[in-house]
Amino acid sequence: MPDRSGSFNPRLIYVVVFVVILIGLALPGTLWGGPIDDHARRAYQAVLDVRERGLVYVGLDYDSKRWPELEAQALTVFRHALSRRLRVVVVGPRLTVESFAGRLERLPGGPPEGYGDEYALVAHGLDLAAGNPASAVRGLWGAAAGKDYRGRPFEELPLLARFDGPARVDLAAVFVYDGTSTPDPDYVGKYLAVFESMGRPVMAGVVGHAGATAYLERLAGVLIGYRGAGDYERLAGVTGAGSRGAMSLNIGLGLILVLIVVTFLVGWRRRLAERLETIRRRRMQGRQPREGNSPPS
């Protein structure tokens, strides 16, 4: 047999993958439940703390095709704010806002009532890779040529017509790139620069910890990935895209674990069969008469 001392056993890769995925599934906020993340609790409380009929600014600065977990976060915060009879203005790039509007159309019972009075969607034309989307906040209201994403003038939408600047915002909920793309635009910091100077709280939704780590103490709350969306939905008592997304991910990871176990069992069974066959052949060879020792005829 060849000497395998010092050689790399490829089965170790499966062991490492198995352990890593198992640890991920065992963490809180997965398919099996667990404690809700404190940052998600703070985000939920930030919406609860908004005064009656207050205004929530929802900033969608992401590509919905690349980061569906951010859209899930924004959707659950938007629905929770409306359920509390708060008013909501959603602002972002045109394609992202149109995707968000499409999600509202697909809600059970259709989009919420009260467009223009209770909520509105506005698309800005800034380039997310090079621009500062927070600058759209300053010029959003009071612009003579201001229009919503459908092209309706602000003057025709009471929600937008009656406000003249970001100082009227009670809470900014921004869902942004967070360093998982290149370059890192630091959108969280740019939004804080706009709203903190006016004493307005900011909560953020991100894909991972990278974009929020430096601002955790300054933010009113943070939702991280599908887990953050799912935690928020649990707090709000609803089931939405966040919970479904987290469940799908966990089911997929669980299936990977099952496949790894099956692979090990199949390999073990094959090796066992080969070993038994080797033993059988050796026994058969041992029973054959040796040359020169055959019994006399």
Image (cartoon, rainbow, N blue to C red):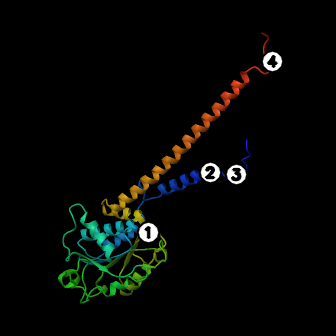
Q: Is residue 5 above or below residue 172?
A: above
**Picture disc at residue 10:** 2
Kindly check if marks 3 and 2 are in contact, taking CB atoms under 8 A apart as contact.
no
Distance, label 3 to label 1, CA atoms, is 39 Å
Circle 1 residues within 10 Å: few <14, some 14–19, many ≥20: many
Quarter of the image with the C terminus is top right
Q: Which residue is mark 4?
A: 293
User: Of label 3 and label 1, which has the lower sequence position?
Assistant: 3
Q: Nearer the viewer, mark 1 or mark 4?
A: 4
**Picture disc at residue 207:** 1
Please give the name of the residue rendered at 75% of the width and 19% of the height, measured from the top-left corner.
Answer: 289
Q: Position of residue 74 (x, y in %)?
A: 34, 70
Please state the total of marks drawn on the protein image.
4
User: Of label 4 and label 3, which has the lower sequence position?
Assistant: 3
Q: Quadrant of residue 101?
A: bottom left
Q: Which residue is mark 3?
A: 7
User: Of label 1 and label 4, which has the lower sequence position?
Assistant: 1
Q: Secondary structure at mark 2?
A: loop
User: Of label 2 and label 1, which has the lower sequence position?
Assistant: 2
The residue nearer to you, when weighing 295 against 33, is 295
Distance, label 3 to label 2, CA atoms, is 9 Å
Please give the name of the residue rendered at 30% of the width and 82% of the height, measured from the top-left corner.
Answer: 169
Distance, label 4 to label 3, CA atoms, is 44 Å
Please give the name of the residue rendered at 72% of the width and 52% of the height, measured from the top-left corner.
Answer: 6
Circle 4 residues within 10 Å: few <14, some 14–19, many ≥20: few
User: Of label 4 and label 2, which has the lower sequence position?
Assistant: 2
Distance, label 1 to label 4, CA atoms, is 78 Å
158 with respect to 189 (left or right) = left
Q: Is residue 261 above or below residue 216?
A: above
Quarter of the image with the N terminus is top right
Kindly check if marks 2 and 1 are in contact, taking CB atoms under 8 A apart as contact.
no
